[in-house]
Image: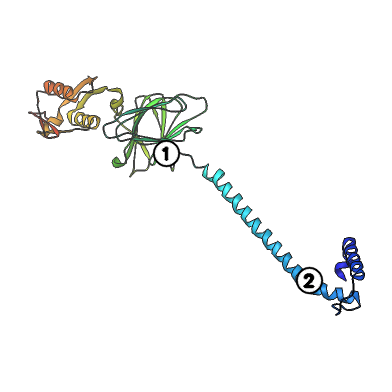
Amino acid sequence: MTWVEASTANREYFDHMQALWGAAEPPATEFFEKNWESSWDKVEEAIQPVAKVRRLRGRFFRMQLAAVLLIGIGLSFWYFFLQEGEPEWKTIQTASAEKTEVLLPDSSRVWLNANSQLRYDPEFSDRVVWLEGEGFFDVTHQAGATFSIRSGEAVTTVLGTSFNVRAYPEEKKISVSVVTGKVQLANAVDTKEAVVLQAGQSASLDEAKKSPEIDEEPAVNAPSWHTQVLRFDDELMLEVVQALEMQFGKEIRLDNPAIGNCHYTGNFKTNDLTEIMNALSFALRLEMETRGDSIVLSGEGCNQ
């Protein structure tokens, strides 16, 4: 009689059913023993396993529900926290014959040369950009906040200045030339051997050397692709030709190697290569002609 004694409601139900049974006409055949308590014990014993099965099913259902809730919470955490933690980079890419100007969220400006890519987090809270190729930077000063450019294995850090960064992967070298202000160039992995550059200085980080070095002869024409100004001060023609090739992406050949020994001094404020080559040919008494996609200079040249 465990079920009957379990609660007042069970006892009342049992008494009510007993009263109804007693008021009914007795059946021809007795279905239950005259001992009510013994008969009810048998019924209770018969239904007890079913009750146990029901409890197990309810517990299993609750376990399934808890598992579904845990999976849902886990997916929500992954989506809102982990996935949102990876910024969607803003990317600017220039083509082979394209240059473009980029205004950054902090009002700094970047001019990208051809075949270059600039990436940054649109929120720009850490003022860090990634550069592949070449760019001229005019960085807005913010008190206590640095500005960094990551290029391969190099990191360039500034406070407020203008400078040029050249970091084409195929050249295996990162070059930095400062126009105004002060810039620090270091290996991104080990910043202990960083170099600090003043206006008019340049430095490079060679992939093989792993540490930056200040150039003995500053690369004054490094930003010429942006400023459209080329300056040569008693430069060897061999170096002049190399600067022009880098600036215009055009092959210039010396028909006579001795031409490379000649020195040239002068400034060019033009983006017209033909005009520059005519001026050089006139000054050094050289002949210029176009052969296919190349420009060829010929003449007597100079002694070493």
Using the rendered view, name the quadrant where residue 113 is placed: top left
Q: Is residue 96 visible?
A: yes
The residue labelled by disc 2 is 48
> Left or right: where does residue 149 sit relative to residue 49?
left
Using the rendered view, name the quadrant where residue 275 is placed: top left
- Residue 3 position within the rendered picture, expressed as x and y whole percent measured from the top left: 85, 68
Marker disc for residue 12: none
- Residue 262 position within the rendered picture, expressed as x and y whole percent measured from the top left: 15, 27
The residue labelled by disc 1 is 193
Q: Residue at x 62, y 55 (%)?
A: 68
In the depicted structure, whether residue 132 falls above or below residue 46: above
- Residue 248 position within the rendered picture, expressed as x and y whole percent measured from the top left: 22, 30
Could you say whether the residue bearing mark 2 is in a helix, strand or loop? helix
In the rendered image, the quadrant that contains the N terminus is bottom right
- Residue 111 position within the rendered picture, expressed as x and y whole percent measured from the top left: 35, 27
Give amino acid for label 1.
Answer: Glu
In the rendered image, the quadrant that contains the C terminus is top left
